């Protein structure tokens, strides 16, 4: 099954993104907690793109393609902004984040822990981030 959503680069669009993801994930074998974790991961990547790569410019957009089978679901996030290679992200030491009382910077850590595989490719000004989640067969 394939589904698509275009999200304009306005943080108000994130509620539409959540609803879209909820409707897709509710028919999977994922538990309710796993569904919420996956939504959090996809939303984190999209929110970072909206805020950091596109400066909340609502004239720009991100395309989300969801490809699912019984065994796997893939979230393919395409944008045309400044590339951010999630794979090259250096995780901060949690103790240092707590000590400095810094807000933010932990979302990518969550994405890496929630998803089973992450791919990133960029060419010219097109960026594609793929987030893979293996579905439990119950």
Image (spheres, rainbow, N blue to C red):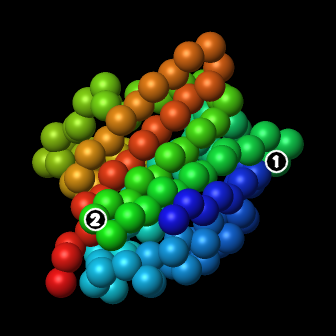
Near mark 1 (Cα within 10 A), the count class, few <14, some 14-19 or many ≥20, is: some
Residue in view at x 60 percent, y 62 percent: 3
Residue 77 lies, in percent from the top left, at 54, 45
Q: Secondary structure at mark 2?
A: loop
Residue 1 lies, in percent from the top left, at 51, 65
Q: Quadrant of residue 41?
A: bottom left
Residue in view at x 33 percent, y 85 percent: 32
Query: Does 101 sit left or right of 76 as displayed?
Result: left
Please state which of the two labelled residues, at mark 1 or mark 2, is closer to the viewer: 2
Q: Is residue 97 visible?
A: yes
Q: Does residue 74 sit above or below 79 in this rendering? A: below
- Which residue does the numbered mark 2 point to in the structure image? 71
Residue 71 lies, in percent from the top left, at 28, 65
Q: Is residue 109 visible?
A: no
Is 106 in front, or is 17?
Answer: 17
If the image is split into quadrants, where does the C terminus sit? bottom left
Q: Does residue 101 sit above or below 12 in this rendering? A: above
Between discs 1 and 2, the one toward the N terminus: 1
- Which residue does the numbered mark 1 point to in the structure image? 58
Between the C-alphas of marks 1 and 2, the distance is 35 Å
């Amino acid at each position: 099954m394939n589904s698509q959503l275009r999200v304009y680069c306005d943080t108000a669009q994130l509620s539409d993104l959540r609803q879209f993801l909820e409707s897709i994930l509710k028919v999977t074998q994922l538990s309710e907690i796993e569904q919420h974790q996956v939504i959090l991961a996809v939303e984190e990547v999209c929110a970072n793109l909206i805020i950091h790569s596109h400066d909340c410019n609502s004239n720009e957009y991100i395309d989300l393609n969801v490809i699912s089978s019984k065994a796997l679901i893939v979230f393919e996030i395409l944008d045309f902004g400044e590339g951010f290679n999630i794979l090259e992200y250096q995780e901060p030491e949690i103790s240092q984040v707590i000590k400095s009382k810094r807000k933010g910077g932990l979302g990518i850590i969550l994405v890496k822990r929630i998803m089973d595989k992450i791919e990133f490719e960029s060419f010219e000004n097109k960026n594609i981030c793929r987030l893979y989640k293996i579905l439990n067969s119950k």
